[in-house]
Amino acid sequence: MVDKGQGARQLTPRPDQPRELVLTGEPQSAREAREFAREYVMQSEPTASEDYVDAIVLVTSELVTNSIRYGTEPGDSLALKLHTCHGRTRVEVRDPVRRRPQLRPESHKRDRGRGLVILDGLCHWGVDDVAFGKIVWAEVIAK
């Protein structure tokens, strides 16, 4: 698309192309990530069910929250990358800490620590080591 008023060319990303968002390692970034994920999936998969969109938003929220809590230090940032194609969405969160997420035994005494259990129920997920950190990824498939 061309903006004739300024002569600058603005490209509209194709819905089947990955989208990336860089976030600060602060709690409010989880909300921004959820909004970004919902908007992206609704644009790239306009016929997606509400359950599918909600699952992707929840997975995104869990991955970003875990990254903020355990994968960043003050001043760090993280990257969220989404790619949707034919009813399959891959969510990737890259942060600068190599420590891998650990699935904890179920406990009714803790207020948190259930995020990876939730991921296990919604999708297939894993961790890849990369230069200067790690990527925690999850794939959600439409049912």
Image (cartoon, grey):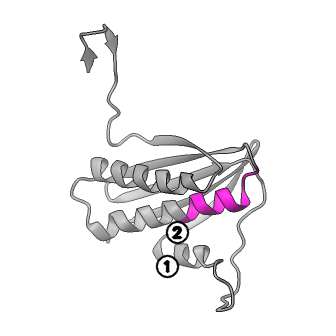
Q: Distance between the residues labelled 1 and 2?
A: 8 Å
Q: Whole-percent x and y of residue 112?
A: 64, 78
> What residue occupies the far top of the structure in this picture?
7
Total label count?
2
Horizontal side of residue 111 vs 143, given as left or right? right
Circle 2 SS class: strand
- Judge whether 51 appears above or below 114 on screen: above
Q: Which mark is residue 134?
A: none
Circle 1 SS class: helix
Residue 100 visible at all: yes
Instruction: Give 11 or 65, whichever is nearer the viewer.
Output: 65
Q: Whole-percent x and y of residue 79?
A: 59, 45
Task: Report if residue 67 lies within the magenta region.
Answer: yes
Residue at x-position 66% and y-position 88% = 106
Q: Residue 121 carries which label?
A: 1
Residue at x-position 42% and y-position 62% = 56
> What residue occupies the far left of the structure in this picture?
47
Q: Whole-percent x and y of residue 63?
A: 58, 61
The quarter of the displayed image where residue 66 is located: bottom right
Residue at x-position 42% and y-position 49% = 36
Q: Name the residue under label 2.
A: 124
Q: In which quarter of the image is the N terminus?
A: top left
Label 2 sits on what residue type?
A: His
